[in-house]
Image: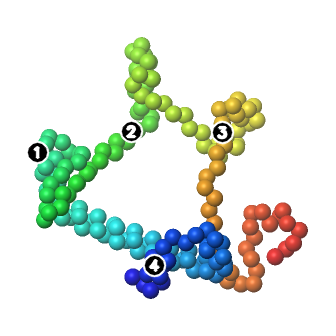
Amino acid sequence: MTPQINSLIQTGQPSTAELDALSMVEIYQRLELLGQFKDTTRHHEVALHATLNKRFSDQAQQLRQAAGKSTGTVRFEVDGFVVIADLPKRPEYDQSKLKGAVEALRKWGENPDEYVGIEIKVSEAKYNAWPPAVRQLFEPARTLKVGKPTYKLELVKSDKFADAANDSNFNEVL
């Protein structure tokens, strides 16, 4: 580990007051350091999981086959450790074929709600392009929620700042 990462780890969890006292340079440096730390951590995690898969995939698959299944969790012991090997199911369905199957259920006199859940999604881009009457029809079903705010710091590479989306709201030109 780099000395900076060791230093960051040793500081523990700083208080809000400690973070509020940081300069923009210090905030930027910490964000850069955290980005490097995340990348390194992600790389190590991927590599270690690849090693575990290489080492145990055959044994896990044999245990699944012996249990009469092709997916799921199996457990076995190796060198004093219990290895829990999970191969989850990730079913995917062709949406157009599902629509056909739902229509077939209706033709049979069955209620598709007893077999499948149907979720209608509306693309925000399409919603914004709709004529006002159509938009008004869907408005009672629409709730606008917001995500978590994010911020990114970049060093200024010249003496001119890039235009921000809200620069027109200010009389001053940077």
Say which residue label 2 marks.
Answer: 93
Label whose residue precedes the other's in the sequence (3 or 2):
2
Residue at x 74%, y 77% (from the top left corner):
161
Q: Would you say the residues marked 3 and 2 are in contact, meaning their CB atoms lie under 8 Å apart?
A: no
Looking at the picture, which amino acid does disc 4 mark?
Gln
Q: Secondary structure at mark 1?
A: helix
Could you tell me if the residues under marks 2 and 4 are in contact, i.e. CB atoms within 8 Å?
no
Kindly identify which numbered label has been placed on residue 165. Answer: none
Q: Label 4 near label 3: C-beta < 8 Å?
A: no
Residue 41 in percent (x, y) is at 40, 71
Q: Amino acid at mark 3?
A: Thr
Q: Quadrant of the C terminus?
A: bottom right
| Separation (CA) of disc 3 from disc 1 | 50 Å
Q: Secondary structure at mark 3?
A: loop
Query: Residue 143 — which label?
Result: 3
Q: Earlier in the sequence, mark 4 or mark 1?
A: 4
Left or right: 71 as drawn, with respect to 151 = left
Left or right of 34 on screen, residue 64:
left
User: In x, y percent, where is residue 171?
Assistant: 89, 68
> What residue would you read off at disc 1?
66
| Quadrant in the rendering for residue 102 | top left
Identify the residue under disc 4: 10
Give the position of the N terminus as an image quadrant. Answer: bottom left
Which badge, 3 or 1, is on the more N-terminal residue?
1
The mark nearer the N terminus, 2 or 1, is: 1
